[in-house]
Image: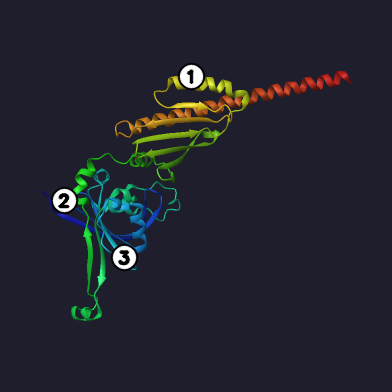
Amino acid sequence: MDDHETEIRIDERLSFQTLHGESLQVDVGTVSRVGSGPVRARLRVDYETWERAVELGCFHLDSVTERPSLSPGRQVELRVRLRTAVDATLPTDLSGVEQRLIGDDDSPDETTRPVDALRQTASWYATGILQTVGFPDGMESALGNGASASVGVDTRWDDFCAVADDRPAEVATYVTDYFDGEEWSYELVEAGIYEIELSLGDRGRFSLYVYADEEERVCSLYAVHPDSVPRGARADVTDLLASRNYELERGAFGLDPASGDVRYRLRLLPDEESFAEGFDRAVSAMSSVFDEIAEHVEEVTDHAGEVTDHADEVTDHADETLD
């Protein structure tokens, strides 16, 4: 069994994203790996960030029932290990892990870039919680200036990780992994709901909303055509959508007769073999049909304009005749 440990020092303050879309500032000290085991890291956060991390259940702290009594005003050290499913996507060389972890924090579009799984708190399990404490002055003098000790606990995540890693990944992980693979920028609108913008070429863009329902373990896609359908074209567009729905394996288009909005809905089950393929088909269907609708509406609008122009000509001719 290979138990050789490799470790590199990072010493960088990085932003980690929670499942709620909130950013936490974390000092990354080292990353290490023992043999072929998962990547581990030593992180430090200030006490206020620690309290927020506990409140939000970051690093799976919501499942840690025994936490040490910590002192405000002092940093808290978290020893964490990476989720196996994420670890499997990493290079074996820790320098490659470092490069992916740090990324390009100076990029001007940092706020719109997809958040790498390494910078998501849900990808890491807190295996240890520690805090450095000082000694009383008299004891410190006897032990030497700067003497200190750490207090803390080892959580049970190392014991349970083998079981936890066998559980299905969070639905949100499937969603963000797909976005990252397509190199799409996205926004976490609220917990579990993501928004991306897709192009219709010269006809503009439309927003696609993706809801990762962890309780039901389903992913719901929802999109609305950027333009409402004029009343004169709604009957024809309804027929068009009925025809396209018949051709779809999954998902459905619908037209709101009151507003003229065209919507698309689809529910995907997050299994690795078909999720990306289903998402690809959905995006392709949305883009194709939305483009068809835009083209059809343009034709109807142009025809209506021609009818109006003709009516104006007839009116003008009648006025001339009366004169």
**In this view of the protein, which residue sits in the foreground, 157 or 14?**
157
Q: Are marks 2 and 1 in contact (CB under 8 Å)?
A: no
Tell me if mark 1 has few (under 14), some (14-19) or many (20+) residues whose alpha carbon lies within 10 angstroms of its own. few
**In this view of the protein, which residue sits in the foreground, 209 or 113?**
209
Q: Which image quadrant for residue 14?
A: bottom left
Q: Nearer the viewer, mark 2 or mark 1?
A: 1
Q: Residue at x 47, y 21 (%)?
A: 244
Can residue 46 be seen here? The reply is no
The type of residue carrying mark 3 is Gln
The type of residue carrying mark 2 is Gly
Place of residue 148 in the rendered image (x, y in percent of width and height, measured from the top left): 23, 72
Residue corresponding to mark 3: 75
Residue corresponding to mark 1: 243
Using the image, tell me which numbered label, if any, was put on residue 35: 2
Q: Classify 43 as above or below 313.
A: below
- Left or right position of 319 against 183: right
Q: Nearer the viewer, mark 2 or mark 3?
A: 3
Instruction: Report the quarter where the C terminus lies.
Output: top right
Q: Residue at x 43, y 20 (%)?
A: 247
